[in-house]
């Protein structure tokens, strides 16, 4: 499957995920001397897609087992592992067990919003709307 066809499949999956009830996952952010680390705590059984990054970066699989689309195709990854990511990659994954995934980026940013502006491509507008709608439904319950 070509890179473009693969990305289209992941975007199609993302559309389906965004229309479903969302979980509120825990995320930690750490800034240190030109580095930004973002750790996702992914519950077992979760299906997710990642953000598209503007630069190459490093990923640390700290805990767990996850099936994930990597730069080399779909792989079953078990912690601990270090994975290099190229810019522009769109990932999809399924957490088989509770998983901790950390991305590390070089940046001059010192806060999350500035780091995301610098490092991450903007999400597609309809995905943002679907996620916002899901959040409102959750607040009403």
Image (cartoon, helix red, strand yellow):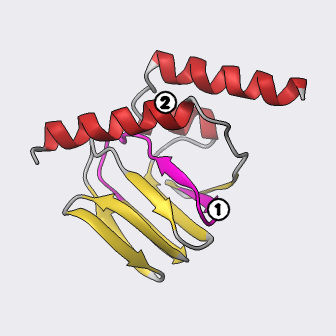
| Residue located 21% across and 43% down the image | 6
**What numbered label is drawn on residue 131?**
none
Residue 57: where, in percent of width, then height? 35, 56
Q: Is residue 128 magenta?
A: no
| Residue located 63% across and 71% down the image | 98
Q: Is residue 77 above or below residue 49?
A: below
> Spatial distance from mark 2 to mark 1, Cα to Cα?
22 Å
Question: Tag 2's secondary structure?
Answer: helix
Q: Quadrant of the C terminus?
A: top right
Q: Is residue 11 above or below residue 50?
A: above
Question: Tag 1's secondary structure?
Answer: strand
Residue holding disc 1: 41
Residue 122: where, in percent of width, then height? 44, 26
Residue 84: where, in percent of width, then height? 30, 65
Viewer-proximal residue among 39 and 136 = 136
128 to the left or right of 123: right
Are there few (<14), some (14-19), or many (20+) residues within 10 Å of tag 2? few
109 to the left or right of 7: right
Viewer-proximal residue among 110 and 95 = 95
Q: Residue furthest right?
A: 141
Viewer-proximal residue among 23 and 89 = 23
Place residue 105 in its image quadrant: bottom left
Residue holding disc 2: 117
| Residue located 54% across and 41% down the image | 109
Residue 81: where, in percent of width, then height? 41, 79
Magenta range: 37-57
């Amino acid at each position: 499957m070509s890179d473009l066809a693969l990305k289209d499949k992941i975007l199609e999956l993302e559309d389906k995920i965004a229309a479903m009830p969302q979980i509120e996952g825990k995320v930690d952010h750490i800034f240190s001397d030109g580095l930004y680390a973002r750790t996702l705590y992914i519950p077992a059984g979760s299906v997710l897609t990642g953000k598209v990054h503007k630069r190459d970066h490093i990923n640390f699989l700290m805990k767990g087992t996850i099936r994930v689309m990597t730069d080399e195709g779909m792989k079953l990854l078990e912690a601990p592992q270090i994975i290099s990511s190229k810019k522009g990659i769109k990932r999809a994954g399924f957490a088989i067990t509770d998983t901790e995934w950390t991305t590390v980026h070089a940046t001059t940013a010192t806060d999350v919003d500035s780091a995301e502006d610098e490092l991450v491509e903007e999400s597609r507008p309809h995905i943002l709307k679907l996620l916002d709608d899901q959040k409102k439904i959750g607040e009403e319950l």
